[in-house]
Image: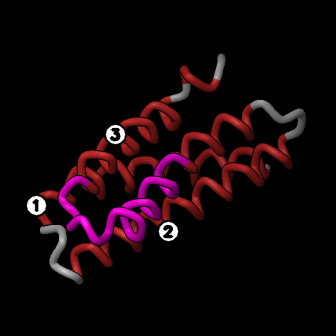
Amino acid sequence: MIYREMIVWQKAMELVKEIYFLVKLLPKEETYALSDQMRRAAVSIPSNIAEGYGRKSKIEYSRFLDIARGSLYELETQIHIGIMLNFFTNENTERAFSLSQEVGKMLNSLITKLEK
């Protein structure tokens, strides 16, 4: 199996796409602030899954999955900030949060398996 066949990577890529749609709702003054932060955090998730997959050891792979999970939590926080500042509504963040939960569960499961 290659990393692109992994469901967790595919879901993380869907999340990236969703975030790119979501940040278009931000006001123009957030272009170089919250918008950039959200895009970087989102892109970091599948990127770290792929990079870790390419490493030679389970320990390194697990470390990159931990980084991906950290980026996921960062992204969730940024979405909550967008809601708190009334840039987003619960309705237009529903899919992002749903994908985020799926990816988080899969990352946790994969990390647990690698650590055994």
Residue at far top of view = 1
**For the residue marked with disc 3, what is the amino acid?**
Lys
Q: Is residue 31 left or right of residue 43?
A: left
Magenta part mainly helix, strand or loop?
helix
Q: Secondary structure at mark 1?
A: helix
Q: Nearer the viewer, mark 1 or mark 3?
A: 3
The residue to which callout 3 is attached is 17
**For the residue marked with disc 2, what is the amino acid?**
Glu
Within 10 angstroms of label 2, few (less than 14), some, or many (20 or more) residues?
some
The residue to which callout 1 is attached is 91
Kindly identify the residue that appears in the image at 17 percent across and 68 percent down: 88
Q: Quadrant of the N terminus?
A: top right
Q: Residue 36 placed where, x, y %?
A: 44, 60
**For the residue marked with disc 1, what is the amino acid?**
Glu
Real-space Cα distance between discs 1 and 3?
17 Å
Tell me if residue 38 is in the magenta stretch: yes
Kindly identify the residue that appears in the image at 41 percent across and 65 percent down: 32
Q: Earlier in the sequence, mark 1 or mark 2?
A: 2
- Tell me the magenta residue range: 24-43
The residue to which callout 2 is attached is 74
Within 10 angstroms of label 1, few (less than 14), some, or many (20 or more) residues?
few
13 lies above or below 79:
above
Q: Residue 107 placed where, x, y %?
A: 57, 49
